[in-house]
Image (cartoon, rainbow, N blue to C red):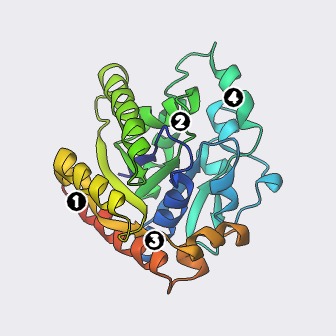
Amino acid sequence: MAKIFCVANQKGGVGKTTTTVNLAAGLAKVGQRVLMIDLDPQGNATMGSGVDKRKLELTVYDVLLESASVAEARVHSEKCGYDVLGANRELTGAEIELVPLERREKRLKQALLEVDKDYDFVLIDCPPSLSMLTLNGLCCANGVIVPMQCEYFALEGLTDLVNTIKQVHANLNKDLQIIGLLRVMFDPRITLQQQVSEQLKDHFGSKVFNTMIPRNVRLAEAPSYGLPGVIFDPSSKGAQAFIVFAHEMVERIKGM
């Protein structure tokens, strides 16, 4: 059975897409079968996986509206080593079109049941807002990976996300939990970041991943080449950190 994880944070610009594509590439490199689902209409995770969103015949939009299956809509990224269920601007319309439909929050969950045996990991890149799209991701997930910068405002955003996860857990998905907090864009030279990091560990304990992703220029450059940093420059500190994180994820789900 595939383990399904949303990469989510209600604060924008915290590295959700970077985390999703690099973790997907890292897991593929360590021998896992991975499906990456882009639930953001901007389609950045699609493009960042070496797939041109403008040339996609079928996307996650078609899957949500049940006009295509996951098996029909997914494409394999040869460069990255994982499958992609991509997104483009069409997905913006799904927000409105899903509202009157039955099972609107659980359409992605239903669709993924058909490919459950094909993958070890399904990673979902969620938009920053709590929308019908994010809700579809949260309803089918075993857990949430929360990438966050060690800054003051990030703690406020985390409170909002924890409350959202509690509500979804109570009403729509009893399996949903926070799998872990991933500290990203971390610079150990900045005292405030060290302090926030310690606060996170004090408050969330083992829910904080051991791996920290450093602030890294090569990770930031990689999307402009349509690749995750793990593929673009495997020797960079950021890429190596994501490989370590992939190993930590594999270990962590053994206990689930």
Q: Mark 3 or mark 1, which has the lower sequence index?
A: 3
**222 sits left or right of 112 in the view:** right
Q: Secondary structure at mark 4?
A: helix
Q: Position of residue 34 (x, y in %)?
A: 48, 61
Q: Mark 4 or mark 1, which has the lower sequence index?
A: 4
> Which amino acid type corresponds to the residue marked 2 in the rendered image?
Leu
185 vs 192, nearest the viewer: 192
> Which amino acid type corresponds to the residue marked 3 in the rendered image?
Gly
Q: Residue at x 33, y 62 (%)?
A: 191
Q: For the residues marked 2 and 1, what is the alpha-carbon distance in whole angstroms?
A: 24 Å
196 vs 35, nearest the viewer: 196
Q: For the residues marked 3 and 1, what is the alpha-carbon distance in whole angstroms?
A: 17 Å
Rendered image: mark on residue 254:
1
Rendered image: mark on residue 26:
3
Q: Which residue is labeled 2 in the image?
A: 108
**92 sits left or right of 109 in the view:** right
Q: For the residues marked 3 and 2, what is the alpha-carbon distance in whole angstroms?
A: 24 Å
- Do the CB atoms of the residues marked 3 and 2 lie less than 8 Å apart? no
Q: For the residues marked 4 and 3, what is the alpha-carbon distance in whole angstroms?
A: 30 Å
| Above or below, 240 relative to 122 | below
Q: Position of residue 67 (x, y in %)?
A: 70, 33
Query: Dot 2, how many residues are within 10 Å of its Cα: few (below 14), some (14-19), or many (20+)?
Result: many
**152 sits left or right of 196 in the view:** right
Q: Which residue is labeled 4 in the image?
A: 94
Q: Residue furthest right?
A: 55
Q: Residue furthest bottom?
A: 235
Q: Is label 3 or label 2 in front?
A: 3
**90 sits left or right of 49 in the view:** right
Q: Mark 2 or mark 4, which has the lower sequence index?
A: 4
Tell me if I can see residue 36 in this picture: yes
Q: Position of residue 107 (x, y in %)?
A: 54, 30
